[in-house]
C-alpha cells in the first residue's frame, strides 16, 4: 500500500478545491481502512467549493472532502469485530456519539455531536478513507456496482423525507429536482403515488424528472401563483395531497403551502439560505396542514429501505449519473453542478480499478444475530 496518496482537499479559507498529495490515513483500533472505488459529488461539496457562509463557519482546512462513497475494506483495527478485509461497503457519513439522548433513543440523525465525513473529518475523495466500523454498511457487489453503491447515502435522504408518510394512491408535488428531488420522484413512482407533479427551473433536471417517472413537469418561471394554478389544474382542480419541498428556494416554499390541499401534508427538506416569510394563518392553520421539517437519514432504518429499493431493482438510478471523472476534472465538475447541468457526478479515485485482495482474505464471520436466531436474555 502506498504511504501517500492524491486527495481532493480544501487547503485554504477561500473558494475552490485542490488536488494534493497527503499521507494515507491509518485506521485506529475501532476503524476500517477502505480502498475507495467510487465517491459522488454532492451539494454539500458545492457549498465547500464556493466557500459560502456555512462553510466558513464549519470547515477547518486542510480537509479532504467526500462523504458519499463505496469501496473495499483493505485493513481493520484490532478491536474491529464484524467488518473484515475484502468486504464491499459503503458508510453512513454521520459519525454520531452514541451517548446523547438522541443517540440512545434511536434518533442518532439528530445527534448534536455528529461528525460528518468530508466536513468535520477527512473524507473519501481519495484512494483510501478511514471510517469507524460502526458506520459501515455491507453491500452486495453482484447487485450494486460502485457508481450506484456510492449513491445510497444521498438516496437515503430522499427515502427518509419521502417514505415518512404513505404515498400510495396520493397526488404529490415535488418542488426542486436536484439529485434529492429526482430521487424523490423515483421513490414516489416506486411506492405507487397516483400523480407526481415535479417542478424545477433547469431544463436538464426537468427532463430527468420525466425520465424518473413524473406525471407532469413544470418550469416555475412566472412566479408561485402560476405554478400553483398549473398544478391544481393538472390535478383535476384540487390541491395535492402531499408536497415534498426539496429546493429550499423561497418561491418554492410559498408554492408548497399554496398548492397543498386543505388537510394535506407539506414536507420541508430543501434548506433555505436565509429566513423565509410564510403566512402561518392563511396557509397553515386555516388549511389544517401537517407540516414536517426533516433533516438527514434515520440511521440505519433508511439504509434498509434503500437496500430494498436499489438492490431489488425497484428504482434504477443509472439515468441520474451524468458522468464519472478522475481527479483532474473535479473543479470543472463543480462548475457543471453549480450551473444545474448535471445530476450526480461520480469520482473514481482509483481509476475504476477493483482492489487487489488475496482470495483467502475474503472471509468474514457473520454477525451472530444475522440469521434471526434467538438471543439469550
Ligand atoms: Zn451528500
Ligand atoms: Zn449523540
Image: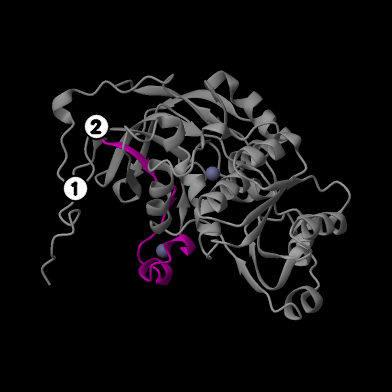
In the rendered structure, does residue 92 fall within the stretch colored magenta? yes
Which residue was labeled with disc 1?
Answer: 81
Question: x%, y% of residue 314?
Answer: 45, 44
Which of the 4 image quarters holds residue 18? top right
Residue 112 appearing in the image: no
Residue 186 appearing in the image: yes
Decide which of 125, 370 is in the foreground and name it. 370
Question: x%, y% of residue 228?
Answer: 81, 59
Marker disc for residue 89: none
Farthest right residue in view: 222
Q: Residue at x 12, y 72 (%)?
A: 377
Which residue was labeled with disc 2?
Answer: 86
Q: Residue at x 72, y 70 (%)?
A: 261
The range drawn in magenta is 86-111
Mark 1 CB near ligand 2 (8 Å cut): no
Which of the 4 image quarters holds residue 170? bottom right
Element marked by disc 2: loop
In the rendered structure, does residue 57 fall within the stretch colored magenta? no
Q: Residue at x 65, y 37 (%)?
A: 208
The quarter of the image holding the N terminus is top left
Element marked by disc 1: loop
How many numbered discs, if any? Answer: 2
10 Å crowding of disc 1: few (<14), some (14-19), many (20+): some
Q: Is residue 110 above or below residue 223?
A: below
Q: Residue at x 67, y 45 (%)?
A: 177
Quarter of the picture for ligand 1? top right
**Marks 2 and 1, the one that precedes in the sequence:** 1
Amino acid at each position: 500500500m502506498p504511504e501517500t496518496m492524491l486527495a481532493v482537499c480544501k487547503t485554504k479559507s477561500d473558494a475552490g478545491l485542490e488536488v494534493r498529495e497527503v499521507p494515507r490515513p491509518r485506521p485506529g483500533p475501532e476503524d476500517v481502512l477502505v480502498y475507495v472505488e467510487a465517491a459522488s459529488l454532492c451539494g454539500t461539496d458545492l457549498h465547500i467549493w464556493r466557500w459560502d457562509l456555512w462553510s466558513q463557519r464549519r470547515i477547518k482546512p486542510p480537509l479532504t472532502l467526500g462523504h458519499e462513497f463505496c469501496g473495499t475494506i483493505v485493513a481493520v483495527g484490532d478491536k474491529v469485530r464484524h467488518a473484515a478485509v475484502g468486504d464491499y461497503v459503503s458508510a453512513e457519513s454521520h459519525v454520531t456519539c452514541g451517548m446523547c439522548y438522541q443517540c440512545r433513543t434511536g434518533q442518532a440523525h439528530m445527534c448534536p455531536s455528529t461528525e460528518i465525513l468530508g466536513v468535520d473529518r477527512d473524507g473519501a475523495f481519495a484512494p483510501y478513507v478511514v471510517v469507524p466500523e460502526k458506520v459501515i454498511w455491507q453491500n452486495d457487489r453482484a447487485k450494486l456496482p460502485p457508481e450506484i453503491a456510492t449513491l445510497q447515502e444521498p438516496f437515503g435522504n430522499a427515502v427518509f423525507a419521502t417514505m415518512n408518510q404513505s404515498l400510495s394512491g396520493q397526488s404529490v408535488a415535488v418542488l426542486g429536482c436536484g439529485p434529492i428531488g429526482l430521487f424523490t420522484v423515483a421513490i414516489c413512482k416506486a411506492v405507487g403515488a397516483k400523480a407526481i407533479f415535479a417542478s424545477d427551473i433547469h431544463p436538464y433536471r426537468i427532463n430527468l424528472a420525466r425520465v424518473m417517472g413524473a406525471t407532469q413537469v413544470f418550469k416555475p418561471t412566472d412566479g408561485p401563483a402560476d405554478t400553483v394554478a398549473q398544478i391544481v389544474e393538472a390535478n383535476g382542480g384540487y390541491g395535492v395531497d402531499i408536497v415534498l419541498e426539496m429546493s429550499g428556494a423561497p418561491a418554492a416554499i410559498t408554492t408548497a403551502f399554496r398548492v397543498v390541499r386543505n388537510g394535506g401534508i407539506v414536507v420541508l427538506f430543501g434548506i433555505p439560505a436565509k429566513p423565509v416569510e410564510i403566512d402561518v394563518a392563511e396557509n397553515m392553520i386555516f388549511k389544517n396542514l401537517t407540516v414536517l421539517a426533516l433533516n438527514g437519514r434515520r440511521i440505519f432504518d433508511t439504509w434498509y429501505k434503500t437496500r430494498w429499493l436499489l438492490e431489488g431493482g425497484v428504482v434504477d438510478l443509472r439515468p441520474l449519473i451524468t458522468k464519472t471523472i478522475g481527479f483532474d476534472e473535479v473543479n470543472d465538475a463543480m462548475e457543471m453542478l453549480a450551473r444545474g447541468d448535471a445530476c450526480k457526478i461520480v469520482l473514481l479515485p482509483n481509476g475504476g480499478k477493483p482492489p487487489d485482495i488475496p482470495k483467502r482474505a475474503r472471509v468474514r464471520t457473520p454477525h451472530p444475530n444475522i440469521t434471526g436466531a434467538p438471543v439469550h436474555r
